[in-house]
Amino acid sequence: MFGLSLLNSLALGAGCILLFLWQVYLRCFTVKNKSGFPLPPGPKGEPVLGHFRVIPEDNPEFAYMKWGKEYGSDVLYFNVLGRPIVVLNSVQAAVDLMDKRGANYGDRPRFVQFEVMGWGRTLTFLRWGPKFKQHRSLMQTSFNKSNIKQYRPLQENEARKAAYGILKDPAEWEIISRRFSSAIVLNIGFGVTIDSNEHPYLQYAVDANFATTNGGTPASTSVDYFPFIRYLPNWLARSAPLKHARDWKFAIQKITDIPFANLQKEIEDGVAGPSISHTLLDRYKANLEAGTPNPFELEDIKGAAGAIFIAGANTTWSTIIVVILNLLLNPDVLAKAQAEIDSVVGTDRLPDFEDRPRLRYIDYIVEEAIRWAPLSPVGVPHRSLEDDVYNGMFIPKGSIVYANARAMCYDETRYKSPEKFNPDRFTPKEEGGAGEPFSLGPFGFGRRICPGQHLAAASVWIMVTTMLATMKIEKPIGADGKAIEPGTGLSNGLSSHPEHFEVSLTPRSKQAEELLARAG
């Protein structure tokens, strides 16, 4: 009895000390508003905790959309344990702040969850400063619209190999699609050729994708709010996202370390092919030999190459899956797309990038897939560097600012029936269409906009066009003789993609299969 009483007293005393320290923290570090303007609206929080238990841990984008309508505002404010959070639910607000005031919104918060997972000097997570600017400059130069044209032969070749592989083994269509997207970025980043579905790098990509897409909303997990729990055992930390980060850290280590180490050995052996990493390593070695400082250290090169791999491969693969899902759900879209390809390309050759200007409907399909299921629903958050006022609302210094891509892509003032997959929504008004705009949210804003978006879109376009030209894409028939309807569930985390579904992929004609066989 005495021992139990002592333990209770100690626990109570520790709790009081923690509460006192927390109150001191709140007094010292909570928002100080001297602007005279009110904070943006938002739901009521709780004492001390603020909105910690109010914001859903899973799929918060839907709650943000609901609150935006409830409060009649495209800018929302939350306070989680003293940390100010601002959510932007409209393209206009995101452009006004993240684009036009980019110098103030170019920073990132600290992502403790992804630190635990093993992400290092990767552009996506770098804080504002010289390192970020170096990485961004490299990526922008490497993947601008003009420079990516050099990769068209690679993309066409990989698309044809993948399409032929799917027709030979349709049950493996997902892993073959993954091989296609990974093969392109691995070749660009490391000079690697992926020649089979069993290549170990493919499993690295699958594992890294699972690790990243199931790691929770960036900067919003328990370890992001309480960094000290990263040092506690799982049974004491009691954090599912933290346990996930620890369990899957190996995946991030493999994807960043192994291809890089293998490339270094290939360079030493004189057998390495051309790649971005090869160029950077040659420059690094030349600077060392000349005694010149290296602005890009080895960890920077590794981080840049890893970013190309995971971001490029995952974006491309996920969008391809979204397209296939919606072709199953919308046979009228499928029929129109194949009719356009037959009219422009014919049936005696395979499509290529020279056909793209005349295959606008395929571009519309890709853009609609990006809008319908934004890859990163709430985006990777920015951080404000100074106090700001926007439309009469005060945004505190140090705010974590989310651009809610889901809200932007489903904005009823921009898109009629946004829940419907309708590529025709982008047809210009002068051609009888609605002239609705391409979505901006999914690839980010301002100085954090995704530099690889044009490469990813081109890869998706050539793969989708090749599949449409050569395959019947249909719902499979079940044992009961009825078509199996695909599910429409999406994963939750840093990035999102459809859950597994069944699809029947067969040759459109014998000639189409022969064209792929010769090309592959």
Image (tube, rainbow, N blue to C red):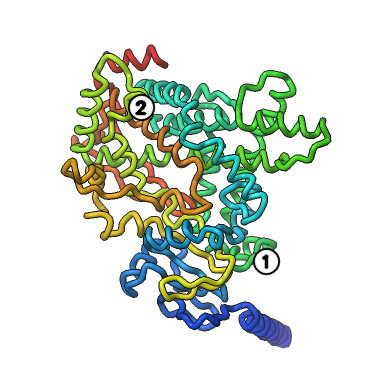
User: At 61% from the left edge and 31% from the top edge, which residue is drawn?
Assistant: 276
Q: In which quarter of the image is residue 378?
A: bottom left
Q: Nearer the viewer, mark 1 or mark 2?
A: 1
**In the drawing, what numbered circle is on residue 500?**
none
The quadrant of the image that shows the C terminus is top left
Looking at the image, is mark 1 or mark 2 earlier in the sequence?
2
Q: Is residue 6 left or right of residue 124?
A: right
Asked which secondary structure carries label 2, the reply is helix
**Crowdedness near tag 1: few (<14), some (14–19) or many (≥20) residues, C-alpha within 10 Å:** few
The amino acid type found where label 1 is placed reads Phe
> Relative to the observer, which residue lies in front, 429 or 459?
429
**Crowdedness near tag 2: few (<14), some (14–19) or many (≥20) residues, C-alpha within 10 Å:** some
User: At 33% from the left edge and 22% from the top edge, which residue is drawn?
Assistant: 351
User: At 58% from the left edge and 32% from the top edge, which residue is drawn?
Assistant: 189
- The residue singled out by tag 1 in the image is 228
> Relative to the observer, which residue lies in front, 256 or 365?
365
Can residue 130 be seen in the rendering of this structure?
Answer: yes
Q: Is residue 50 left or right of residue 477?
A: right
- On the image, the x and y values in percent for residue 403 come to 44, 59
- The residue singled out by tag 2 in the image is 170
The quadrant of the image that shows the N terminus is bottom right
